[in-house]
């Protein structure tokens, strides 16, 4: 009987160690993926800067290119690059296009606590420059807060004094999220008691 209990205990210890190892692995994977996304963004910014430098260099050397091309008529040289502007134009057009991602907004809580309405929400993107803005039907004030990035999403908590609401009742709440890369909107009904 004692031997059976020690086997069970050993089994649970091994199981706990495996679960901790899996959790740590998942955390490292998510962090590595976020680091790669940041690295990709830095590479894209670097490519854009290089394209700008190349374009300005080509503009400055256009007079030199003309003189090289005219002299190459007299003395043809296969090593002279005659088409310097088309490659930089192609490079610039590839880096200047940008797209906006649609973020899904989830409201975790929108409840009244004493004289404040607390709204907690998150966007399903991981970004450091996001802002949440909340509007209410019948209220002439917008409430904004910078978002906080974590490993899996971008979160925000906004406390709104009930005194901003004209009276008790139901209101339509619209939450907007905006960053340099994403936008999102969520609408929900809430009740305020004054």
Image: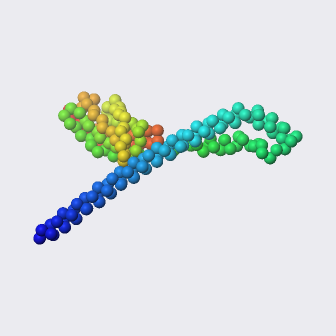
Q: Residue furthest left?
A: 1
Q: Report x, y in % for residue 104.
A: 39, 47
Left/right of residue 49 with respect to residue 152 in the rendered view: right
Q: Report x, y in % for residue 106.
A: 33, 46
Determine the residue positioned at 69% across, 36% down: 58
6, above or below 21, in the image: below
Left/right of residue 101 with respect to residue 145 in the rendered view: right
Q: Residue furthest right?
A: 74
Q: Quadrant of residue 154?
A: top left
Quadrant of the frame with the N terminus: bottom left
The residue nearer to you, when weighing 179 against 48, is 48
Q: Residue furthest front?
A: 3
Q: How is the image coloured?
A: rainbow
The residue nearer to you, when weighing 53 against 167, is 53
Left/right of residue 16 with respect to residue 104 in the rendered view: left
Determine the residue positioned at 70% across, 34% down: 59
Look at the image and tell me whether residue 151 can be seen: yes
Q: Report x, y in % for residue 188.
A: 31, 43
Q: Quadrant of residue 137?
A: top left
Q: Report x, y in % for residue 30.
A: 39, 50
Determine the residue positioned at 19% across, 67% down: 7
Look at the image and tell me whether residue 101 can be seen: no
The residue nearer to you, when weighing 110 against 182, is 182
Q: Quadrant of residue 105?
A: top left
Determine the residue positioned at 72% across, 34% down: 61
Quadrant of the frame with the C terminus: top left
């Amino acid at each position: 009987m004692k031997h059976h209990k020690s086997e069970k205990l050993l089994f649970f210890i091994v199981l706990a160690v495996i679960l901790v190892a899996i959790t740590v692995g998942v955390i490292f994977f998510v962090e590595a993926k976020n680091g790669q996304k940041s690295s990709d963004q830095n590479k894209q910014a670097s490519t854009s800067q290089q394209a700008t430098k190349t374009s300005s260099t080509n503009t400055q050397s256009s007079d030199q290119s003309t003189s090289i091309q005219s002299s190459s008529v007299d003395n043809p040289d296969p090593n002279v690059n005659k088409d310097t502007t088309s490659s930089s134009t192609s490079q610039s057009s590839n880096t200047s296009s940008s797209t906006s991602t649609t973020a899904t907004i989830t409201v975790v809580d929108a409840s009244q606590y004493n004289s404040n309405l607390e709204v907690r929400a998150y966007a399903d993107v991981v970004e450091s420059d996001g802002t949440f803005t909340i509007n209410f039907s019948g209220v002439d004030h917008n409430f904004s807060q910078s978002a906080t990035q974590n490993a899996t999403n971008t979160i925000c908590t906004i406390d709104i004094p009930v005194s901003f609401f004209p009276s008790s009742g139901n209101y339509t709440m619209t939450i907007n999220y905006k960053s340099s890369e994403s936008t999102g909107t969520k609408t929900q009904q809430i009740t305020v008691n004054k």
